[in-house]
Amino acid sequence: MAHHSDSSSYVVRLNIGGKKFCTTLDTLMQREPDSMLAAMFSGCHTICQESEKGYIFVDRDGKHFRHILNWLRDGVIPPLKDSEYAQLLREAEYYQLLGLVDVIKAALSKRKEDEELGTELTRIDIIKCIQSDRVRFRGINLSGLDLSKLGYIFVDRDGKHFRHILNWLRDGVIPPLKDSEYAQLLREAEYYQLLGLVDVIKAALSKRKEDEELGTELTRIDIIKCIQSDRVRFRGINLSGLDLSKLDLSFVDFSYACLKTVFFSRANLQCAKFRYRKEEEVMEMGRCEFTGANLRGAVLAGANLQSANLQDACLIGCSFCGADLRSAHLQGAKLTNANLKGANLQRAYLRHVNLRDTGTPVELPQYLNFKLLIGNAFDLSNYWDASNHEFLKICE
């Protein structure tokens, strides 16, 4: 070990596993004063020095010792492979260079994070990705890539529902979606600050909730159980498509209910109520099946019975005031004292019907289908005003 006037500048010659290095005492002791290397040259320990050239031998692999010396000189380490970092870490731990140990571990940890988020994507990879239906580069490292002239602007959002957003911007409409999909689309609409779309989605969700509250999964068995109770009301209930044939539904309140295509054939509907809300134009009962049903005294004022089948039904005392009976099938129905004031009988099938039995005047339409009224079924001779060439109102 060569000596100079300043002890901190002493030249130290080291033989690390056969590789020879020269440094100063100051380098070995200043940055890591608590290390094994600093302790070796503190004067408190006997060291093995070669007699000929004065090298101090240390029985360690000298491959990475130059990195250790550079760390002690400058406090930096070079980029290395993971395997080389592992070898250098082992040497740093042996020499008890705790600062170097921390730096190596931090470098390895950062590299691991970068690899998890990183990518080896090329421009060709990016072009292939954006040609697919769904493109997401969330958290991907695209550093240094040339994405020029690709014609895409990257937005870090889920693109699953973006086509619905574009269709909204084009046409102002959104498709029917599941509640979960509406929630996802709402989140995207809020992110893009599409306030109109936000309102439409919220309105759709609100209407669906209302429809579900008004909806029903009632079966024929449920109806039978209901009508066995003392008081039966189906006000506002959705009964669409149910088979209620041959049931005793007398005095039942069906007001405001949805009765589209309900099958009432041969049912007893005596004095049943079928009122509708004032804000609604009519009560929708189109294409209902009332064949042979007993509707004596039932209230069907203003109801939409267009194309309903009332064949052979008992309509005695029934109120059809203002009802829509266009194309309704009334063959053989009993209309004694029925109120047909303002009812629309356009294209109604009236074979075997005697309108003279009704308790109110009936206005026969000029375009009544004579082919349906031929023979002895319906005598029109009493209702024809030859002088005015029109049908008369029919009164009892």
Image (cartoon, rainbow, N blue to C red):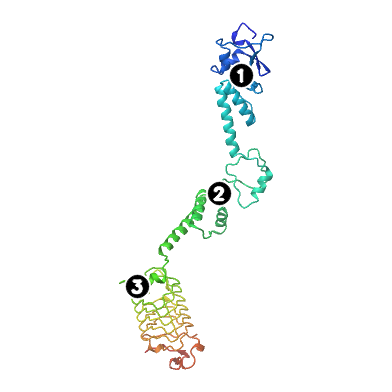
The residue at which mark 1 appears reads as: 73
**In screen coordinates, is 316 left or right of 39?**
left
Label ID, residue 227: 3
**In screen coordinates, is 344 left or right of 58?**
left
Camera-nearest residue between 387 and 93: 93
Callout 3: SS: helix
Foreground disc of the pair 2, 1: 1
Q: Position of residue 86 (x, y in %)?
A: 61, 28
Residue type at the position of mark 3: Ile
First in sequence: mark 2 or mark 1? 1
Camera-nearest residue between 387 and 182: 182
Give the residue displayed 58% in from the left and 14% down from the top: 40
Residue type at the position of mark 1: Arg
State which quadrant residue 75 falls in. Answer: top right
The residue at which mark 2 appears reads as: 158
Q: Is residue 15 above or below residue 343?
A: above
State which quadrant residue 169 falls in. Answer: bottom right
The C terminus, quarter of image: bottom left
Residue 79 in sight in this render: no
Foreground disc of the pair 3, 1: 3
First in sequence: mark 3 or mark 1? 1
Camera-nearest residue between 11 and 131: 11
The N terminus, quarter of image: top right
Callout 2: SS: loop
First in sequence: mark 3 or mark 2? 2
Judge the density around disc 1: few (<14), some (14-19), many (≥20) Cα neighbours within 10 Å. some
Judge the density around disc 3: few (<14), some (14-19), many (≥20) Cα neighbours within 10 Å. some
Q: Position of residue 174 (x, y in %)?
A: 53, 59
Q: Is residue 277 above or below residue 34?
A: below
Label ID, residue 96: none
